[in-house]
Image (spheres, rainbow, N blue to C red):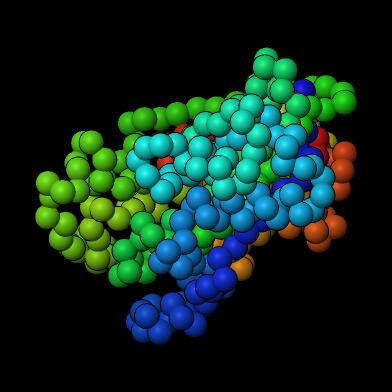
């Protein structure tokens, strides 16, 4: 990489939805057993008038307050989200205006769900390498609660809203830990999906009605659907291949990696990955308890909080990897 992560700013909505609240909303739900699987005790939820754009702006403002850079030095802004204020214009343009970035700053939106941070980091590194840029701001922001049906107990137990603003800067020295690796299996696109609301199924032409699926979950095609077992099997199946390829490209062994930072999907999946890959649990970052699964923001949140806890330190080798919507996967080995 020609770039390095210089700093990360985080934002969480004030509203907290706890497992006690979850139990009140779903009296028959076995919350204690579910919590053991998810690792989530509470999560942050946006207010009705709060959007992914608002959260992203607040995360960036926090980043600037931390003092590693002033906003006039940002050369490019990447906004990663499945949401946004409008279909067009791009949300990155709105974030640019709200932050007061310089006119000579380029902007772009990307939407890649759980692997979004990896894609954004790769794009930032490429912009710095090929475009002669110095500082790229990558904002990942997901107001996913707005897409979850109120009666969907499974997804409400797992997901939370949050944003992260990651400052990616030209590095003084190039680090050579192999290339970014990505993959896609588009045949599984419908296993994590919000089916209605765009050109294929525009909402005004459809009567949106609730229905009960084969698992007894109340659903609606304008809200998110996730086949949890299919996603679990996909992630567990792809992980060894991805991790082995990353290590081989970097000419490293597993014990030379200081920490493995996977997309924070749920605790049981992370534990299963660790066992299957024979990774000591103390080398896997878990950051789910008070955040839940924050989609594209989960890896930068895990990085920042691990740094604040004194776990991750400058100069350490980290393997970051994610699996999710699309189906897509991606990873890289970086020096923090």
Image: 22 above or below 265? below
Taking the spot 51% from the left edge, 60% from the top edge, the residue there is: 161
Residue 112 image position (x, y, % from top left):
47, 37
Q: Nearer the viewer, residue 220 or 69?
A: 69
- Left or right, 71 with reference to 195: right
Q: Residue at x 51, y 62 (%)?
A: 160
**Where is residue 36 shown, x and y percent of the image?**
55, 70
Residue 141 image point, x, y percent:
53, 49
Residue 201 placement: quadrant: top left
| Quadrant occupied by the C terminus | top right
Q: Is residue 122 above or below residue 307?
A: above
- Depth order, front residue of 147/303: 147
Residue 298, above or below 209: above
Q: Give the quarter of the figure containing the N terminus.
A: top right
Which residue shows up at 44% across the image and 36% down it? 90
- The number of numbered badges drawn on the structure is 0
Please tell me which residue is depicted at 82% across the width and 49% down the height of the picture. 67
Q: Is residue 331 visible?
A: no
Q: Is residue 148 left or right of residue 260?
A: left
Q: Position of residue 62 (x, y in %)?
A: 70, 55
205 on left or right of 63: left
Query: Foreground: 232 or 115?
Result: 115
Res. 300 visible in picture? yes
Left/right of residue 211 with respect to residue 168 in the rendered view: left
Q: Is residue 261 above or below residue 151?
A: above
């Amino acid at each position: 990489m020609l770039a390095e992560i210089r700093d990360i700013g985080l934002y969480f909505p004030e509203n907290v939805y706890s497992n006690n609240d979850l139990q009140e909303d779903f009296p028959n739900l076995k919350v204690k057993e579910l919590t053991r699987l998810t690792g989530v005790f509470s999560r942050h939820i946006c207010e009705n008038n709060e959007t992914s754009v608002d959260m992203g702006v607040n995360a960036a403002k926090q980043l600037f307050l931390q003092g590693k850079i002033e906003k006039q030095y940002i050369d490019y802004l990447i906004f990663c989200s499945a949401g946004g204020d409008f279909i067009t214009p791009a949300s990155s343009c709105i974030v640019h205006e709200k932050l007061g970035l310089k006119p000579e700053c380029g902007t772009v939106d990307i939407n890649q769900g759980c692997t979004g941070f990896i894609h954004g980091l790769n794009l930032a590194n490429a912009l710095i390498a090929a475009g002669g840029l110095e500082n790229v701001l990558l904002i990942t922001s997901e107001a996913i609660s707005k897409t979850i049906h109120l009666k969907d107990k499974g997804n409400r137990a797992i997901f939370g809203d949050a944003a992260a603003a990651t400052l990616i800067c030209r590095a003084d020295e190039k680090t050579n830990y192999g290339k970014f690796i990505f993959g896609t299996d588009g045949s599984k696109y419908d296993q994590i999906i919000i089916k209605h609301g765009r050109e294929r199924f525009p909402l005004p032409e459809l009567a949106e009605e609730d229905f009960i699926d084969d698992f007894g979950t109340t659903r609606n095609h304008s809200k998110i659907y996730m086949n949890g077992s299919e996603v679990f099997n996909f992630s567990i199946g792809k992980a060894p291949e991805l991790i082995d390829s990353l290590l081989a490209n970097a000419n490293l062994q597993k014990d030379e990696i200081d920490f493995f930072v996977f997309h924070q999907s749920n605790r049981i999946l992370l534990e299963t990955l660790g066992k299957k890959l024979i990774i000591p649990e103390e080398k896997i970052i878990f950051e789910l308890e008070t955040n839940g699964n924050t989609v594209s923001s989960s890896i930068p949140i895990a990085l920042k909080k691990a740094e604040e806890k004194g776990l991750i330190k400058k100069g350490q080798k980290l393997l970051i990897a994610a699996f999710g919507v699309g189906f897509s996967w991606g990873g890289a080995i970086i020096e923090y």
